[in-house]
Image (spheres, grey):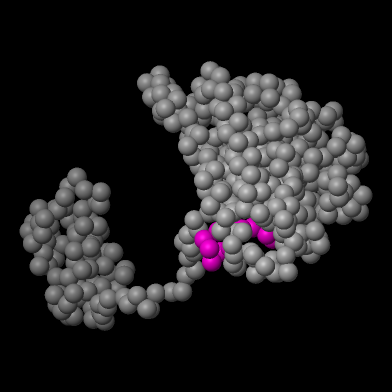
Amino acid sequence: MLTLAFSPSGQEPLYQQLYHHIRDEIQAGRLAAGERLPSKRQLARQLKLSVVTIEGAYSQLVTEGYLESRDRKGYFVLPVRWERTTPSPQAAPDIPPLPEERGRFRYDFATSGSDAESFPFATWAKLSREVLSSRDQALLSAAHPQGVPELREAIAHHLYQFRGILVSPEQIIVGAGSEFLSTLLVQLLGPQGGYALEDPGYRKIARIFSASGAQVIPIPLDAHGLRADRLAESGARIVHITPSHHFPLGTVMPVSRRRELLEWAGEREDRYLIEDDYDSEFRFTGRPIPALQGLDRAEKVIYLNTFAKSLAPSLRIGYMVLPPSLLRRYRQELLFYSSTVPSFEQYTLALFMERGHMERHIARTRNRYQQRLAALRQAVRETGLDRFCTLSGGESGLHLLMTVRSPLSQDELTRRAAEAGIRLYPLASYYLCEPHKRAASTFVMGYGKLTETDLQDAFQSLAKIWSF
């Protein structure tokens, strides 16, 4: 039984290889209870191993109850009851499937989608090869905790060119998406005092703040966005907002309301506004909406954005811009965190932006999404859905609202769509508190990853199943 082959170059130390072999022999019953094993010196000679190696294996087996060491007599196998059974599929624990495993839809109007065909694969591959050949040493070194300098410089230039935001690259922190950065912000700002959120809004951010120990305070909206009067009454000290294109209503916050929020933040030293500028690149009518950060003179706005909409959600690269006062605190308290984005992706994205590819890509995709939006509107008209469906909020971004005037309930409309392979997202599901009456039978329609043909087919199906 103890004639076995060892792998000196294996991943396991020799004593562990011996331990596993003897344990398996005992569990299989090939070493019977009460059987005496060779002495340490005898087995060492037999296997051509050191006595220390044998002692290590025997000691582990004694500790786990497989062997008994008897003074001056040696090592003996202890009785071990071991039943080998084949687990039955029916006996497996009832673990709920992951969301993406719960069902497949032919047409999914999720707001998180983007057009895969628009991604500049050829350019990205070329730049990736260049990074591999020119940055070989840098790729093997740890990146700066705030992100590689080249990418932060490219982002600072991009913000000035496209959003009119003048910041130093030193103020920028690159991270693995807005979710990670939001968690980091709770650590930086502290969980106490209450975090106000738009209601309706991005429900995942509420879960992130809550999981980080912060009290979430929903604030209702009016025609101009988050209500400043209700914010003042809430007792919150941090507020997360999407002022340039509210998610999901599409509201653009006017400058008067923005100034109200800045005044609110300026009343106390520990108040801050988190501006989530998630889809500012895609505005189809009029001039781009200036960022709230550009109005800030008191270092009260934290700017947050990602490349999920402009490039791809899977890229998992986001960034935030901290005001100088918070940057000093971040470097004192949180600079120990390593960069969460691989250097390879950071250098590649930096080149992509520095050489103008980002600007051209955004221009192309903006036109493509505008055509897709036009195709959606046309599909609603051609299928006759416009007789009882109203579209709104499609001036920018990659989603709009569709309100259905129907004797069918919202649940019934959603169920019929699902049975036809169409996944819809009721506006009511975006509320943290009781949904507003305008949410009844209103759906948030993301069209980023649906082709013109998909849209035509999906709305033809909806016209059939919603006929009444």
Relative to 435, 127 lies left or right = left
Residue at point 68%, 21% (across, down): 161
Relative to 187, 300 lies left or right = right
Relative to 305, 299 lies left or right = right
Work out whether residue 371 or residue 144 is closer to the camera in this orientation and state it: 371
Measuring from the top left, give residue 137's x and y in whole percent. Answer: 40, 23
Residue 423: within the magenta?
yes
Measuring from the top left, give residue 369's x and y in whole percent. Answer: 60, 37
Measuring from the top left, give residue 21's x and y in whole percent. Answer: 19, 64
Query: Would you identify the image quadrant in which residue 290 lies?
Result: top right
In which quadrant will I find the C terminus? bottom right
Span highlighted in magenta in the image:
417-429
Relative to 261, 241 lies left or right = left
Residue at point 48%, 63% (across, down): 103
Work out whether residue 415 or residue 7 is closer to the camera in this orientation and state it: 415
Q: Relative to 391, is 158 above or below?
A: above
Query: Would you identify the image quadrant in which residue 279 lies?
Result: top right
Residue 363 seen by the camera: yes
Residue 187 seen by the camera: no
In which quadrant will I find the N terminus? bottom left
Residue 155: within the magenta?
no
Measuring from the top left, give residue 164's x and y in whole percent. Answer: 74, 24
Q: Relative to 219, is 453 above or below?
A: above
Query: Would you identify the image quadrant in which residue 270 lies?
Result: top right
